Amino acid sequence: MDPAQEHPDNPFGMDADCRNCPDLCDERTTVVHGYGDVAADFLFVGGRPGPGADRTGVPFTGDPAGRRLQRILGDLGFSSSPPDADQPELDGAYLTYVTRCRHPERGPTDEEVATCDAYLTADVRMINPEIIVPVGQLALRHVAVEHTTRDASTLDVADCHATTIRGRGFELVPMLDPAEQTDAETAAFVEHVGESVLNRDYRQTKGRSGARD
């Protein structure tokens, strides 16, 4: 983690009591803002907090899907903590969501996604990553609208999982929702990032070397 960084939890001081979406305020446990290394090259973006993150306040923690993603981070060298850690020690990775509050009975509405967009935009600008990992269908389409020339409505995360998509200023490496991944799909993602992304100088080869248009 950046040695100048005081703590990994909501390091940019975003509104921890945000009340911009009235229908969510009484349903959520906590507002889940970003977490991790502010000097990260890899930005992992989920669609909305899982039940574990809603409890812990830390993205991708506290439930089986979170533990799967934390194992992936460990396998790639981004985490030195066990997969069940509620506050993992991350180096080179930052975790965040398209929307910051969880409704236990439904996914986010289009209005809620739009309302939260300023938070994600701020995360992207302040982290300025080399690689964005959209986790799940909602995250892929939302990130693709802003950061690729592709028609986001045509992108299916199942088809794009463990591939590289050329972005505008970034590369996108989509990932299936960890709650839906098989062990083989997890292994494919780790292999792709480990062999095709980390083992080349992605800072110099963005938009080339195997990246899709």
Image: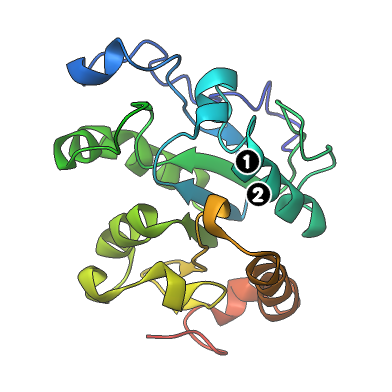
Give the side of residue 55 with respect to residue 98, left or right: right
Left or right, 143 with reference to 93: left
Q: Seen in the image, is 155 located left or right of residue 183? A: left
Residue at horizontal 32 percent and vertical 64 percent from the top: 144
Residue positioned most to the left: 111
Q: Quadrant of the N terminus?
A: top right
Residue shown at 83% from the left, 37% from the top: 81
Q: Amino acid at mark 2?
A: Leu
**Is residue 209 visible in this depiction of the protein?**
yes
Task: Report whether residue 39 is seen.
Answer: no
Q: Residue at x 36, y 42 (%)?
A: 98
The residue to which callout 2 is attached is 69
Say which mark, if any, is on residue 208: none
On the image, numbered disc 1 is attached to which residue? Answer: 66
Q: Residue furthest bottom?
A: 209
Query: Number of callouts in the render?
Result: 2
- Label 2, secondary structure: give it: helix
**10 Å crowding of disc 1: few (<14), some (14-19), many (20+):** many
141 up-or-down from 167: above or below: above
Residue at the spot 58% in from the left edge and 32% down from the top edge = 35
Q: Is residue 74 above or below residue 108?
A: below
In the image, residue 109 lies at what x, y percent? 19, 38
Q: 174 and 122: which one is in front?
A: 174
